[in-house]
Image: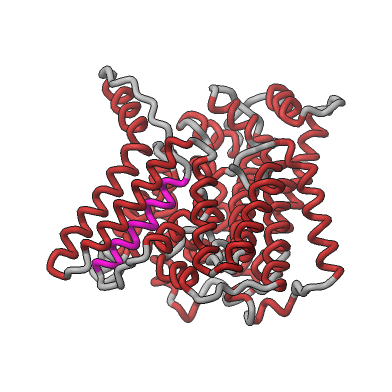
Amino acid sequence: MLFSTYTFIFQFLPAVLLAFAAARRHSPRAGILVLVGASLFFYGAWKPVYLLLLVASIGANFSLGLLMEKPHRRRRIGMLGVALNLALLGYFKYTNFVFDSVHALTGAPVPLVNVVLPLGISFFTFQQIAYLVDVMRGARVERDIVSYTLFVSFFPHLIAGPLVHHAEMIPQFKRARTLRSSLLAARGLAIFAAGLFKKVVIADNLAQFVSPVFAHLDAGGNVTMSWAWLSTLAYTLQIYFDFSGYSDMAIGLALLFGIRLPVNFRSPYKAASIIDFWRRWHITLSRFLRDYLYIPLGGNRQGEPRRYLNLMLTMLLGGLWHGAGWNFLIWGGLHGVYLSVNHLWQKWRGAAKAPTADHLAAVISWALTFFAVVIAWVFFRAKTAAGAWAMLGALFGFGGGSSAYVSSGILRVMDLPVRIGAEDLLLIGSGAVILALAIALCLPNVPQIFRYREYRRAPEASRWPQWRPGLAWALLSALAFAISLFGMWQRLEFLYFQF
């Protein structure tokens, strides 16, 4: 069930809000039980059989946590739990990839399997791995199965994050009274409307200039340089507004129930270095990779060569976490190289001579960072290695393709009643990309506008108009929501649902 569907907005969400409010009149615990039931129903609405997988995963990890209460067997059981979680994730996410790769490399016959990837398995598996590792490190074992179940399955973050930490979620469920108020609900609805607008109006419209081009290249075709740049830049902005829009909607939905989720994006395309980019992009995943992979591998504590090896391993595995494919591995490897070069540059230049010390250096640093990120997105988006390399060739003038097929493909996606020429369509797409890029670079992000969490007292928050409960903001949110409703007929999925 997608957030950007009429079923979710006009049926599921109102029913859950009414049931939650009624249950809380009885007791806070009853309200939490309603959220658990709603979250399990939300997941089971996709494919009921995979609800059994989610419940089994929750039950197994909760039981393993209880068994780890005795210190003498904590590490042994914890390692077993981590291995079981990784085995589950590996089977569902990488079986097809392994068999296909073996067949492609050796030509050997392989079993005909088609394992369906359960929604959100990467997210709820990583969250539970983090819980077991923290218990191994001495964290308190959770004994309340209801709170633990809701930590894993809370429907706003269940499918595509943010990746939440048990220490920041479970205490919120156990409060005698969750922080519910009309002000919090108003902020939550406004944040949800802003995220829905980003997803439906910006991301989904940019997608129309992305999918036909990449599909054409994956099928063995070629495109012109101008179409290659338009499609790549459109995807660069589509994935940002798509995923950050989802994260904003998740934050807004959680606020309706008095729950605060972590911020997952801080205007990543404003970053002036790759290091800064990963402090702004998918923040909760970066936190997980740092705390549960990079630091356990040794981090930067064992010398410079080992540091760069650890960076590469972390980013390669981060790439594979996003998807089972060689292109994801290349994407992760590129960012591993980027981070290593960035750290080497900082060490050589010195902290006192940061590249953002003057305006020209800051612009150059930003441009290099943005260019590097854009190039890496080619591998992230392309379905085949041949398609990715064809796109890279076209970006640098080696494509030699025609725009006729791409233009007709985009027009079929748009389903317009009139025909538009290739040059006019290119101009429309370029305008859409420029406008979206201006929004990403020049305007504050949603948590800034709504003074959410760390932005409540941030110095940069005062530079822009801030959300306040009142008629003007209510009308603006209602307008954004209404425009989004008219655009929801496209029924495009969130990009991160496949991860």
Residue shown at 65% from the left, 51% from the top: 15
Q: Quadrant of the N terminus?
A: top right
Q: Position of residue 358 (x, y in %)?
A: 61, 75
Q: Nearer the viewer, residue 436 or 89?
A: 89
Q: Nearer the viewer, residue 270 or 462?
A: 462
Q: Position of residue 300 (x, y in %)?
A: 30, 69
Residue shown at 72% from the left, 58% from the top: 194
Residue 405: image quadrant is top right
For the stretch drawn in magenta, what is the main secondary structure?
Answer: helix
Q: Position of residue 335 (x, y in %)?
A: 44, 53
* Relative side of 20 to 440, left or right: left
Q: Position of residue 305 (x, y in %)?
A: 27, 62
* Relative side of 201 to 119, left or right: right
Instruction: Write the start and end of the magenta stretch as one range.
Output: 120-136
Residue shown at 62% from the left, 66% from the top: 255
Report the residue that reaches farthest toward the front: 26
Residue 362: image quadrant is bottom right
